[in-house]
Amino acid sequence: MKILAFSVVLFSFLASTSAEAAGVVVCNYCFSPKDAAINSGTGYTLVLDYDSQKLYAYEVEYDRELKRYRAVTNQVPESINQSFLRGMSISGPSAITERNMKSRDFMVATDSGSVNIILRPGDPNYSNPIQFPDAFRNSNAYEVVNSASVRGLLGQALARELAGATTGNPTWDSLAFQLQSIILSIGGSTIGVGSYRFLIIWQNGTRTVYTIDPSTITEARYVNGESRDDVGNLLPDANIANPDTAGGYAGEYRFSSGGSFGSWQGSAGIYGVPVSNGSSSSTGMACGWDGANLTCKAK
């Protein structure tokens, strides 16, 4: 009963955000999903039976001859259905079976309330739990930390893939985001699992971290201070220019090549931290923090 009351309030907010669709209705142990859809208003509607782990799709329209509303059954788009099953397998009731879910092996719920998803773009020997955005398949962590545009576009693309908002239909895609928000909100309020954490291991070995929760449902959020190079060195991002976190960059660094050092040096320069004495053959560096300034010198 507690979950149902929460869901009705959440639906009322979400339904108002889409003019082309009635929205997402939560109807637990639903006796008549079709009636639940009709009561939501006209347009495309998803009916979520969270407790029974079922999802229904309808198009609600007004029949002028019969002078009443009717709900026409639609097939739930496959990308949205996979997103639903993924959410249920992590934060829903426990009866979702292995055969109903693709690539669950690399999704692990943690004590922090997040589900860890490891993504390896471009690795033919690895089955990613979600489709990795093709436009970024050949990117790397340096490109992400160096460009606000890349960070934002990648975050949006990850959010679309996670929610299944890749149908090509703006209405279904909007409903996909609404459904994702509801599932994460319920999961967070009931069992404490209400977010996803993406660890992207790029082809060059560098690493990037993003998160998604109900407040960032349409654009995954880049996590400052979590990016690493191919040997585990902390990469420069906004944290290196923040007095509260810049001290975390102090220490000794060893790089796998002069090119890797050069990439680190270039990223640090973008955030206003110069590296002195560097050359194309440098593979070592030391950074010091005096409480106000970070200084780095190649070795």
Image (cartoon, rainbow, N blue to C red):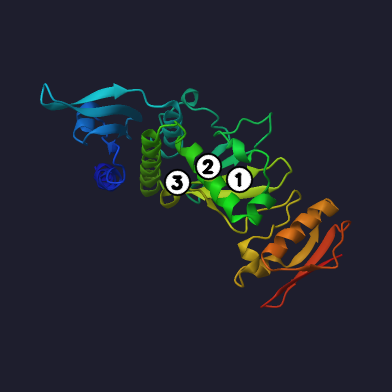
> In the rendered view, would you say 18 is above or below 125?
below
Q: CA distance from mark 3 to mark 1?
A: 18 Å
First along the sequence among labels 1 and 2: 2
First along the sequence among labels 2 and 3: 2
Residue that carries the numbered disc 2 in the rendered image: 157
Percent x, y of residue 209: 59, 50
Task: Determine whether the residue tagged by mark 2 lies in a helix, strand or loop.
Answer: helix
Task: Determine whether the residue tagged by mark 1 lies in a helix, strand or loop.
Answer: strand
Mark 2, Cα crowd under 10 Å, few <14 / some 14-19 / many 20+, is many
Viewer-nearest residue: 87 or 293: 293
Q: CA distance from mark 1 to mark 2?
A: 15 Å
| 187 relative position to 254: left or right | left
> In the rendered view, would you say 54 is above or below 208?
above
Residue that carries the numbered disc 1 in the rendered image: 199
Q: CA distance from mark 2 to mark 3?
A: 9 Å
Task: Determine whether the residue tagged by mark 3 lies in a helix, strand or loop.
Answer: loop
Mark 1 residue type? Leu
Residue that carries the numbered disc 3 in the rendered image: 218
Image quadrant where one finds the C terminus: bottom right
Mark 1, Cα crowd under 10 Å, few <14 / some 14-19 / many 20+, is some
Mark 3 residue type? Thr
Image quadrant where one finds the N terminus: top left
Tell me, yes or no, if residue 163 can be seen here: yes
Percent x, y of residue 289: 71, 74
